[in-house]
């Protein structure tokens, strides 16, 4: 299918929640690839706008505010400032980084909702929700806690049990209580407005499944999975006091759902920028309503449904807006083989990195791009960070640049020499890099940033091989004229590197351009062998990158180790010993050994496993447990485990569970099934 030509491109990057800082998972998943793409388009002299901003509404912000005893506005003011400054220092080149508490956003989001309402595109539904009579408010899912019906965790939230990972609804919780007042909530009817996604299912199937088969497999696949099911109406309003008030009569005490108002922030931030600089950007509507504008969303995989199904449906229902042409979502980045977790502080925070690793923005950009989780989850380790810096940036890229510039300084006083007759090795080298523009360009156009950066680095590999093969320091003694040609070609490679790496490593590319005195350049010159003319004066060379020593890395590893120890200590403290019971109470529990004969996943329940146990009675026992997140069924078959045999049966997903398999919970939420050290017959009693 032929690619449509567009006049301009609107690029958005997911709005980070303003209740914490930005970490390397965010950078690798969204902001570094988005910035690479935008810088690339600018180098090509294309008309592009890069939109970012803070997402400042929603329950997580109110929870943090209550925890700290401050207002939600104080929370978002603090973190918006921190995030904005961090992005600026790291070189994420937004044209605007605004916020969803701005007056411009408030009005645009409100007007957007009102038009959908007036046009009859929203449906009104009355539902039953939990209500805190002491706090006088309806409770969002995260304001309700109770016992998980799947694993028995007494501290499960209304939307998810963080122990077994089960997705929940508040009504499923056993003995629920309000996290605001601690009281038991009552069920009360409330009215909200919904976007009827089911009415747009056929349109979505045609638009995505037929019209965007070029999307990344992970994006296309997740969309198809949702569209193969029956879509349901999605609430666009919430019973909260923090957010944009619903602009409808009778909606007092309700605000726009954060996932309704947040993506509209892309539009409102564009409008804010265009209103500030109309002579530069023109009217905001050309960036969002002109069919000749291409819209690209950079997001993480957890936001695919919102950006590919819900937001496009909102835009389509409203009318007049363009739809995303591509949504190159990335998978997740892990840290030292463990999932990044903000609640456990298991992360490399950008603002801390900038303080602790001054001047090393490009090192992190390079490593995150080299490890980009484009097709699957990937891993960041400090050792890999060190090795890529020392073995690639220093030993390959920096080494070649330094060799070429120092040799030119030594033999020609930093002046670009003339190119003489070409030998076969010269012609071969020129042939090797002449198509670098086409290679890097085709990969960037396909959002393959990892491979594109590798191709850019290949210029340095070619250069090192060329200088080593030609040995100008030896040839100088017998044929100075020949050295002129060697250095001329080497310097052209250096200049090519300065252009090729501009989207990826903007700080070092600028330093390199300053060293070679390259002031007039653009993307179309990539692959050229006359970027630096004979007689061109270079500036004083210096090292482009520096080696990172072991002690620097050990300091970062110790910091993570200290975090892990603090988490373990906090976990133990949080799990205070329960009230003392006498031995007779303990004897009421009948804990036995069971042999797992079979184990399988429960259909339509991604977190549940169904066990068939030999419990020693001669009859099989069925137990359902919410541990599918931690084990594959085949890994458990044949194991001997401990289970509670006299627990009252309960039905989960239509299956009667006759007991509970015992597991131990690690500080990070990981569950480990309890086993025994030597062979014991099924049915043996634990005493």
Image (spheres, grey):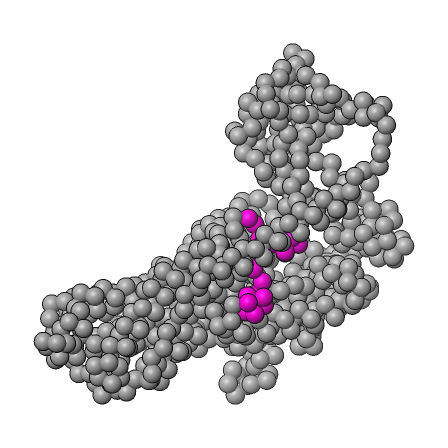
Residue 498 image point, x, y percent: 34, 75
Q: Which residues are magenta?
A: 338-356
- The reply to whether residue 530 is visible in this rendering is no
For the C terminus, the image quarter is top right
Q: Residue furthest right?
A: 134
Could you say which is closer to the camera, residue 350 or residue 539?
539
The structure residue drawn at horizontal position 56% and vertical position 55%, both measured from the top left corner, is: 558
For the N terminus, the image quarter is bottom left
The structure residue drawn at horizontal position 55% and vertical position 67%, both measured from the top left corner, is: 356
Could you say which is closer to the camera, residue 447 or residue 481?
481
Question: Does residue 438 sit above or below 189 in this rendering?
Answer: below
Residue 292 image point, x, y percent: 45, 73
Q: How many marks?
A: 0
Residue 621 image point, x, y percent: 66, 20
The structure residue drawn at horizontal position 48% and vertical position 69%, both measured from the top left corner, is: 361
- The reply to whether residue 214 is visible in this rendering is yes
Q: Is residue 239 left or right of residue 423?
A: right
Question: Does residue 677 sit above or below 324 in this rendering?
Answer: above
- Image quadrant assignment for residue 590: top right
Residue 199 image point, x, y percent: 61, 53
- Image quadrant assignment for residue 618: top right
Q: Is residue 362 left or right of residue 104?
A: left
Q: Is residue 457 left or right of residue 664?
A: left
Is residue 396 a member of the stretch shown in magenta? no
């Amino acid at each position: 299918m032929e690619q449509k030509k567009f006049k301009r491109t609107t690029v958005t990057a997911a709005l980070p929640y303003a209740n914490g800082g930005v970490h390397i998972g965010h950078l690798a998943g969204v902001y570094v690839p988005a910035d690479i793409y935008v810088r690339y388009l600018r180098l090509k002299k294309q008309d592009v706008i890069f939109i970012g901003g803070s997402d400042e509404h929603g329950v997580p912000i109110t929870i943090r505010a209550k925890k700290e005893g401050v207002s939600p506005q104080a929370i978002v003011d603090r973190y918006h400032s921190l995030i904005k400054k961090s992005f600026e220092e790291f070189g994420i080149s937004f044209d605007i980084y605004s916020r969803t508490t701005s007056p411009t956003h408030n009005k645009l989001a409100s007007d957007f909702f009102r038009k959908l309402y007036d046009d009859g595109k929203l449906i009104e539904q009355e539902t039953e929700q939990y209500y805190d009579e002491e706090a006088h408010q309806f409770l969002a899912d995260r304001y309700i806690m109770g016992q998980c019906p799947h694993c028995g965790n007494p501290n499960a939230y209304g939307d998810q049990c963080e122990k077994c990972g089960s997705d929940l609804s508040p009504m499923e919780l056993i003995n629920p209580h309000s996290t605001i007042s601690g009281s038991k909530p009552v069920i009360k009817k409330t009215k909200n407005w919904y976007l009827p996604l089911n009415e747009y299912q056929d349109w979505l199937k045609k638009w995505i499944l037929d019209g965007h088969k070029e999307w990344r497999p992970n994006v296309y696949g997740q969309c198809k999975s949702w569209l193969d099911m029956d879509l349901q109406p999605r609430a666009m309003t919430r019973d909260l006091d923090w957010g944009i008030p619903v602009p409808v009569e009778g909606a007092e005490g309700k605000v726009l759902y954060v996932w309704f108002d947040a993506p509209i922030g892309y539009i409102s931030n564009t409008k804010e920028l265009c209103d500030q600089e109309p002579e530069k950007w023109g009217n905001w509507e050309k960036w969002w309503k002109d069919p000749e504008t291409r819209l690209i969303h950079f997001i993480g995989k957890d936001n695919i449904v919102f950006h590919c199904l819900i937001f496009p449906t909102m835009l389509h229902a409203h009318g007049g807006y363009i739809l995303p042409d591509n949504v190159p979502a990335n998978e997740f980045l892990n840290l030292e083989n463990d999932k990044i977790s903000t609640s456990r502080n298991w992360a490399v925070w950008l603002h801390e990195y900038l303080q602790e690793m001054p001047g090393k923005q490009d090192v992190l950009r390079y490593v995150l791009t080299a490890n980009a989780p484009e097709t699957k989850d990937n891993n960041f380790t400090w050792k890999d960070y060190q090795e890529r810096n020392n073995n690639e940036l220093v030993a390959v890229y920096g080494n070649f640049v330094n060799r070429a510039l120092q040799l030119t300084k030594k033999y020609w006083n930093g002046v670009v020499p003339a190119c003489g007759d070409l030998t076969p090795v010269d012609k071969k080298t020129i042939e090797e890099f002449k198509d670098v523009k086409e290679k890097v360009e085709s990969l960037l156009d396909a959002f393959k940033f990892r491979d594109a950066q590798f191709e850019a680095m290949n210029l340095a590999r070619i250069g090192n091989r060329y200088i080593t093969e030609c040995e100008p320091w030896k040839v100088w003694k017998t044929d100075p004229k020949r050295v002129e040609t060697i250095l001329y070609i080497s310097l052209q490679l250096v200049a090519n590197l300065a252009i090729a790496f501009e989207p990826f490593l903007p700080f070092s590319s600028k330093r390199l351009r300053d060293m070679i005195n390259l002031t007039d350049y653009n993307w179309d010159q990539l692959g050229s062998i006359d970027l630096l003319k004979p007689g061109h004066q270079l500036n004083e060379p210096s090292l482009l990158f520096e080696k990172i020593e072991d002690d620097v890395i050990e300091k970062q590893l110790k910091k993570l180790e200290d975090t892990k120890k603090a988490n373990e200590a906090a976990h133990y403290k949080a799990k205070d010993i329960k009230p003392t019971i006498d031995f007779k109470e303990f004897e009421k529990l009948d804990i036995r050994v069971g042999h797992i004969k079979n184990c399988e996943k429960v259909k339509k329940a991604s977190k549940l496993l169904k066990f068939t146990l030999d419990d020693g009675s001669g009859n099989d026992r069925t137990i359902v447990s919410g541990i599918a997140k931690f084990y594959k069924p085949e890994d458990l078959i044949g194991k001997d485990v401990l289970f509670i045999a006299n627990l009252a049966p309960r039905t989960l997903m239509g299956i009667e569970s006759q007991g509970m398999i015992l597991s131990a919970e690690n500080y990070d939420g990981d569950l480990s099934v309890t086993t025994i050290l030597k062979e014991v017959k099924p049915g043996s009693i634990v005493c």
